[in-house]
């Protein structure tokens, strides 16, 4: 599955292990890395609904987008 980021800064932050740990803490950075790997390996979003962590469709102005739970209230 192809993953898109809001901008280059966010992409760099989430894909650079040191920067991610510094910004979000080591526990959340580990979850981010796992979720990005799951997204990369999944062929469809339906597969993610059976993966660890909650993946759910958003409503309202975010319709068509999905959120994946991380840790400590982060998604």
Image (cartoon, rainbow, N blue to C red):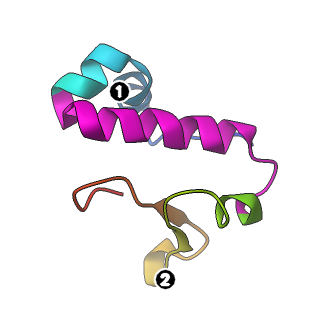
Which residue lies at the image location 32% right of the left edge and 33% below the top edge? 29
User: In terms of secondary structure, where does tag 1 sit?
Assistant: helix
- Tell me residue 54's x, y (percent): 50, 66
Between residue 70 and residue 66, name the one nearer to us: 70
The residue shown at (60%, 35%) is 37
Q: Where is 56 relative to 30, above or below?
A: below
Q: Main secondary structure of the magenta part?
A: helix
* Residue 15 % position (x, y): 44, 23
Image quarter hosting the C terminus: bottom left
Whether 30 is among the magenta residues is yes
Q: What residue is shown with label 1?
A: 9
Q: Is residue 8 magenta?
A: no
Residue 68 vertical placement versus 63 (above, below):
above
Magenta residues, start to end: 23-45
Is disc 1 surrounded by few (<14), some (14 to 19) or many (20+) residues within 10 Å?
few
Q: Is residue 3 visible?
A: no
In the image, is 36 to the left or to the right of 38? left
Q: Residue at x 18, y 30 (%)?
A: 23
Q: Report the side of 56 relative to 19 (left or right).
A: right
Q: Position of residue 45 (x, y in %)?
A: 71, 60
Residue, disc 2: 59
Q: Place residue 66 in its image quadrant.
A: bottom right
Pointer 1 with pointer 2, Cβ within 8 A: no
State whether residue 71 appears in this view: yes
Q: Quadrant of residue 22?
A: top left
């Amino acid at each position: 599955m192809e993953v898109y980021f809001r901008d280059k800064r966010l992409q760099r932050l989430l894909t650079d292990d040191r920067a991610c740990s510094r910004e979000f803490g080591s526990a959340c950075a580990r979850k981010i890395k796992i979720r990005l790997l799951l997204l990369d390996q999944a062929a469809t979003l339906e597969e993610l609904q059976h993966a660890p962590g909650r993946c759910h469709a958003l409503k309202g102005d975010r319709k068509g987008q999905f959120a994946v739970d991380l840790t400590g209230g982060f998604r």
